[in-house]
Amino acid sequence: MDTEIVACPDCDLLQQIPVLNPGDKARCPRCGHVLASAAIDSHHPLDLPLSLTLTAFIVLIIANTTPLMGLSVMGKTASTTIIGGAYEMWINGEPLTAAVVAFSAVIAPGLFILFMLIVLLAARRPPAPHWVGEMLRWAQSMQPWSMLEVMMLGILVALIKIAELATVEPGIAMFAVGALVLLFPAIMVSFNAHEVWMRVEWDHDAAASQSPPQT
Ligand SMILES: [Zn+2]
């Protein structure tokens, strides 16, 4: 695995990564892209992002299945989930807002976590199948669309306004969303995409090194 032939993700130059000492980096000779870096500690480099993503997966389920907030006015109480709130907006003549909320607070973060989870699990044991690279691209395209912190801010502003009219009780989902707002950047910081790219086995590599070409 240490002398595996890899393609530079930036310029596609095929090259061999030498055995690296802890703390070393291997750069592409043509474009200077960092292709590999050896961690100073001996932990599996995908362990931390994997555990953070697993945590985010569980927290996202909690955020979407528990009440976001409860309201009580004159003895009447009501509570809603995130998607329940989006549904209310939809039937109350705000379909565009409802779609934006559903996409940026539920669908995009959900897909991001799902794709990341599959990528991290599939890339744990190299060589990873080539669709892992494709899925990593999907995850990265979903990431800017998950805007939980924007939603969180919107909810807090709304809460302050509603609190004048009704008794508001923040639900479990509110705290779950708060945790996700912290977990998402933590995943991005701990995750090194090159660790995955290095493990992906591309078709031409497979043809060159191990198995005969498949048609
Ligand atoms: Zn390059």
Image: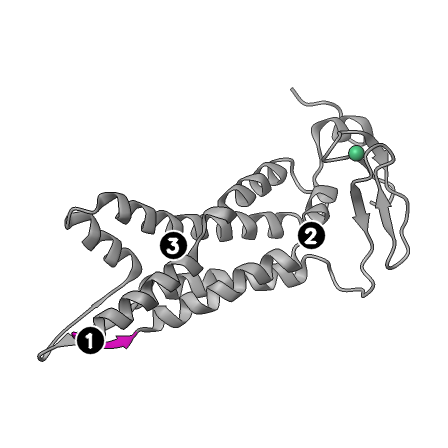
Q: Is residue 109 left or right of residue 212?
A: left
Circle 1 or circle 2, nearest the eye: 1
Residue drawn at (52%, 66%), measured in percent from left and top?
A: 182
Residue drawn at (53%, 40%), measured in percent from left and top?
A: 138
Whether tag 3 and tag 1 are in contact, CB under 8 A, the answer is no
Residue drawn at (62%, 59%), measured in percent from left and top?
A: 49
Mark 3 CB lies closer than 8 A to ligand 1: no
Which numbered dot is residue 105?
3
Q: Secondary structure at mark 1?
A: loop
> Splitting the image into 4 quarters, where does residue 163 fall?
bottom left
In the rendered image, the quadrant that contains the N terminus is top right
Lower position in the chain sequence, tag 3 or tag 2: 3
In the image, 65 versus 69, the foreground residue is: 69
- How far, Cα to Cα, is label 3 from label 1? 26 Å
- Read off the residue under disc 1: 164
Give the magenta part as a residue range: 164-170
**Which quadrant contains ligand 1?**
top right
- How far, Cα to Cα, is label 1 from label 2? 46 Å
Lower position in the chain sequence, tag 1 or tag 2: 1
* 166 falls in the magenta region: yes
Which numbered dot is residue 192?
2
Q: Secondary structure at mark 3?
A: helix
Rendering coords of residue 158 (x, y %): 27, 65
- How far, Cα to Cα, is label 3 from label 2? 25 Å
> Splitting the image into 4 quarters, where does residue 203 fall?
top right
Three-letter code for the amino acid on which mark 2 is drawn: Asn
Whether tag 1 and tag 2 are in contact, CB under 8 A, the answer is no
Rendering coords of residue 166 (x, y %): 17, 75
Residue drawn at (79%, 43%), measured in percent from left and top?
A: 35
